[in-house]
Amino acid sequence: MLLTRSGTALAGALGVLALLSACGGGSSSSSGTPPASAQVDLSDLDLATAGYCDLTVDARCLYPFPNNYFTRADAGTPTGRRVHFQVEAMPVAQPLSIAPNPLAPAGVETTEATPIDPGPWNRNDGFSPGAMIQTWVPDVDLAASGAVAIGDLSAAMDADAPILVLDAETGERQLIWTELDANATGDEGRALIIRPARNLLEGRTYIVALRNLVNSEGERIEPTPLFRAYRDGLRTGEPVLEARRDNMTALLDNLESHGIEREGLVQAWSFTVASQKSLTARMLHIRDQAFAGLGGGAPAFTIDQVGEDIQGEPRGGLSRGISGTFEVPNFLNQAGGVPGSSFNYNGSEDPDALPAQLNGDDTVTARFRCQVPNTAVADFTDPNSPVTPARAALYGHGLFGEGPGGEFRSGNVRAMQTEHNILFCATDWIGMAQEDFVAGVIHRILADVSRLPRQLDRSQQGILNAMFLAELLRHPDGFASHPAFRHGPGDTLVYDPSEVFYDGNSQGGILGGALVATAPNIHRGVLGVPGSNYSLLLRRYGPFAQRFGVVLYQAYPNELDRSLVLGLMQMLWDRAENNGYLSHLDGRYLPGTPTGKAVLLHVALGDHQVTHWSAEVTARSIGAAIHEPTARLGEHPDSNPYVAIPRIEQYPYHGNAIMVWDSGDFDPVSGKGTPYAPSDNTGPDAGDDPHESPRNTVSARQQKSAFMKSFGAVIDVCGNDPCRSDDYTGLSRD
């Protein structure tokens, strides 16, 4: 099937259409009579589960994952498929009890074993574009097998690469790396994980092929009996298994057409990436409905406080702080959109239903704070103090922070304002805000992943809230109409409303790309220490086990389930973080969205909290170019770093870009400096965490400022050296 880059099906290619339906569990069957006798021993298989488990990998029901076996045909979706998980196949959360503590303020307690409710997942017409592809192979030695590792992604294109992800239609090799779950305590729980190093295209079908693998003894690994039966044409003697034969034959034939022989195959399966509609329709719908409701006017707002203090304390460099609230249509199912809300579908069971405003008129009352730097107005008490209008920008806070306070009070934010005359306004990233954490929503989700929409739906409402705050900055009847934002005899507006920019860090960098991609009123943004794909980020987050694993691991004690749960969660997270929107920051703009979007990524090398490898995936997916040299004068642990990321050849550079900031070599004696992060899927903990270093660097802020202009560009602030943060240790490079 020929597909456009947006995933829209074009008429004509029936061969790949057959493949799209080839592996849907129960969606098609052989018309022939099953063989009378078996040629392969399948006595260890539980055939009663064949309707909802893929028994070609019998380690865990939903392995291998993602997998079109867990879909059904649906002519009403852009992909022609619909995810069809059955409750019997889903991981089961075990009861747990954790008392309130500083890391889980509300505690968490469940009393029943509860399978994940597949309903929200079965709304999807495919899987994540950044899919955490996973399976299980006993005692596999990836290095001895020659599998591509994170250190040299170009090996994914080797002719004899043992692990491949191919476009089912074109045969094009995808850039990937492979890893074994380093968090597992034994081989039986060690998932084999395949990571796309560049996001896969919406609506496309991909084939995963594993071949010529060896174990720790150097011995060839054989396929499971069922996969061998399909591969080698052996009879199973079981109608429920023979019903899939034609589909598996089509899959294997397709591989052979792309030069992948059956001989040596250990596993193979296909999956379809969700369409643009499936990933973005809810966010775009609430955006369009909310802005249509404004009727060309500005959102309603109140000003509650005007003064120099932030949470009771004066802050140097700021001449005025302005706090208040604004109203946003509430598309969540509880009044006011309180923590724990999910989208309001008005009781509809239609998988394509879109959120509706609660009761037709309910609103979320969102908090905001704006900060006027003294470079805009030196002294508000002096009526003759001149006004130099500041640029207007939103600031996006970090994990479980708060917009009007928290890090918004920090020195680096104020420095950005005073050094470059920027008026920042901030609101809470609800869904991932302090109030969600304190209310215990996040930990209850980890105890039962069925509750995940209570976070991701509220996060989408939070993105809408940020758009409304930007509109208040832009619209003449918004903040520009209030005297708190004006000064002097000419009643001069203290900021320039012609364009609103975005600057966010950490979580603000992870969610900020989704905001820029969808906002009707933001064109340019800086994503500080960013990434995409929470399923990649979380286990590479240094304190994950202590902060979140303590709940998740008790709820899902099976180690293969833990990995699977993260992959399942990503399918829904796509709707509310960068991962679902990256392709729309690279020229393929979303419907109803202005063109000309651009982002600058500022990355901390060896980041303890947001792995720099996730930022590299983001960069490839949006076509960002990188400053060179990139890291420690060629000392990068990757043998071939930054594969498929183009270099910036000339400054100023116009377009998406990534800058990697180095905070200095690690000294094992003093413990100072930042070592390179582990290359496996664990989090770093040695040395200094450079997570806040880029934003605390004067030259980095200079570069951000040059970019955050209507016709801004990336300027060179590093010269012929790697970009070094201001806390660079200066240790010997010899």
Image (cartoon, rainbow, N blue to C red):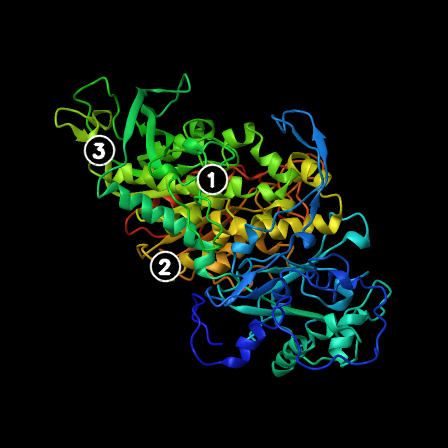
- Amino acid type of the residue that numbered disc 3 sits on in the rendered structure: Ala
**In the rendered image, is residue 694 in sight?**
no
Sequence-wise, which precedes: disc 2 or disc 1? 1
Mark 3 and 2 residues: CB-CB less than 8 Å, in contact?
A: no
Q: From the top left corner, tell me how far across and down residue 621 is, in percent.
A: 49, 59
Say which residue label 1 marks. 458
Say which residue label 2 marks. 589
The circle drawn on residue 355 is none
* Secondary structure of the residue carrying numbered label 1: helix
**In the rendered image, is residue 174 in sight?**
yes
Give the residue displayed 78% in from the left and 64% down from the top: 47
Give the residue displayed 12% in from the left and 28% down from the top: 490
User: Quadrant of the rendered structure where residue 415 is?
Assistant: top left
- Amino acid type of the residue that numbered disc 1 sits on in the rendered structure: Arg
Of 171 and 341, nearer the camera is: 341
Residue 478 drawn above or below residue 700: above
The circle drawn on residue 480 is 3
Of 629 and 192, nearer the camera is: 192
Sequence-wise, which precedes: disc 3 or disc 1? 1
Q: Crowding at label 1, few (<14), some or many (≥20) Cα neighbours within 10 Å? A: many
Sequence-wise, which precedes: disc 3 or disc 2? 3
Side of 428 relative to 534 (left or right): left
User: Quadrant of the rendered structure where residue 107 is?
Assistant: top right
Residue at the far left: name it. 490
Q: From the top left corner, tell me how far across and down residue 23 is, in percent.
A: 63, 70
Side of 488 relative to 26 (left or right): left
Determine the CA span between mark 2 and mark 1. 24 Å
* Secondary structure of the residue carrying numbered label 2: loop
User: Quadrant of the rendered structure where residue 247 is?
Assistant: bottom right
Q: Crowding at label 3, few (<14), some or many (≥20) Cα neighbours within 10 Å? A: many
How many numbered marks, from 0 up?
Answer: 3
Q: Nearer the viewer, mark 3 or mark 1?
A: 1
